[in-house]
Image (cartoon, grey):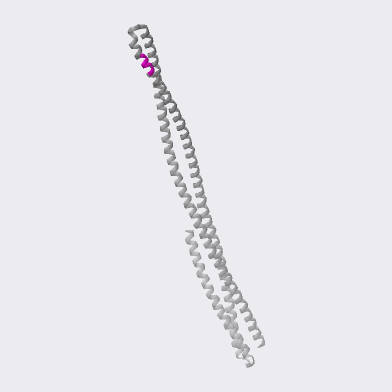
């Protein structure tokens, strides 16, 4: 009978040890689940920030493209202005040439009028006026030529400046597209890392579940053995009845703890299934 009591006591100690281990595993699982929730929230916040940056970068790239198109239109206008300025310069050259020829003709007319004497005085006056008009025309065309040259210089500078601006805008657009691509790639990388972390945690939870399940099965067998020993001991001496009752109470408490452990296992199984579904949905 003493051996039976010792066996029951040993079984009770084993039951207490297994129950303690089960509680420890449940606590570790709860901590892991809590960390998973925090990590998931942090990852979600990072993904939101990266997505916002990507959207802003895409908007900047679109605006840069629009401004580059406008700069290209302005550059075309400046090119047309430069062409018109060159045409005006050509007209000024023609006018200058005509003025020079008119001045030469007026000079010849003055000489011929002087040769004609009194009869050529009136013609000489007209020739002199034509000469002055030709000289005034020449001065005016020279002024126009200077202005046209200034316009051509400014136009050339504007065309070059617009070309440089267009090039810079294009470069900025390229940089922004590169940034957008990098952000999208980083978002995908972060998502993959998050999935990997979640999968690792799910694997750990599964391991904990298997450990707890094994402990519960072992403890169930121990409890059954304890119940059998109690039944055998009950048919023996009444002297140890009180001890048997105490051991029986310990066995019942252990069984209740096992029931609670089984509930914790079921809850973890449900959480694990939800995590698997979330990961599968995220991967798809």
Q: Give the answer, above or below, for where 176 lies relative to 127.
A: below
Q: Magenta segment, which residues?
A: 127-132
**Camera-side residue: 81 or 55?**
81
**Camera-side residue: 189 or 247?**
189
x then y, percent, for residue 55 = 47, 52
Q: In this view, does 282 lie to the left or right of 105?
A: right
Q: Quadrant of residue 201?
A: bottom right
x then y, percent, for residue 112 = 37, 9
Q: Quadrant of residue 134?
A: top left
Q: Which residue is painted at 48% across and 50% down in the image? A: 57
Query: Dominant secondary structure of the magenta stretch?
Result: helix
Q: In this view, does 125 lie to the left or right of 12?
A: left
Q: Which residue is painted at 50% across and 64% down in the image? A: 276
Q: In which quarter of the image is residue 35?
A: bottom right
Residue farthest toward the bottom in the current orientation of the protein? 238
Q: Which residue is painted at 53% across and 56% down in the image? A: 190
Is-magenta flag for residue 261? Answer: no
């Amino acid at each position: 009978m003493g051996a039976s009591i010792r066996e029951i006591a040993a079984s009770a100690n084993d039951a207490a040890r297994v129950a303690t281990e089960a509680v420890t595993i449940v606590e570790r699982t709860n901590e892991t689940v809590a960390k998973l929730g925090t990590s998931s929230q942090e990852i979600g916040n990072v993904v939101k920030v990266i997505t916002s940056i990507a959207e802003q970068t895409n908007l900047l790239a679109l605006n840069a493209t629009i401004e580059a198109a406008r700069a290209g239109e302005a550059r075309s206008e400046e090119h047309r202005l430069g062409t018109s300025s060159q045409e005006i310069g050509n007209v000024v050259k023609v006018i200058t040439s005509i003025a020079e020829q008119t001045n030469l003709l007026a000079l010849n007319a003055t000489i011929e009028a002087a040769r004609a004497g009194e009869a050529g005085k009136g013609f000489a006056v007209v020739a002199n006026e034509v000469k002055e008009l030709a000289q005034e025309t020449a001065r005016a065309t020279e002024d126009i030529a200077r202005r046209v040259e200034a316009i051509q210089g400014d136009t050339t500078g504007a065309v070059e400046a617009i070309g440089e601006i267009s090039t810079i805008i294009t470069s900025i657009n390229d940089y922004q597209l590169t940034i957008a691509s990098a952000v999208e790639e980083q978002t995908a990388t972060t998502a993959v890392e998050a999935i990997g972390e979640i999968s690792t945690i799910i694997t750990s939870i599964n391991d904990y579940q298997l450990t707890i399940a094994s402990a519960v099965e072992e403890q169930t067998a121990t409890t059954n053995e304890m119940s059998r020993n109690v039944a055998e001991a009950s048919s023996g001496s009444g002297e140890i009845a009180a001890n048997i009752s105490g051991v029986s109470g310990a066995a019942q408490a252990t069984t209740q703890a096992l029931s609670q452990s089984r509930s914790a296992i079921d809850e973890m199984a449900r959480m694990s299934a939800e995590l698997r579904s979330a990961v599968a949905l995220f991967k798809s």
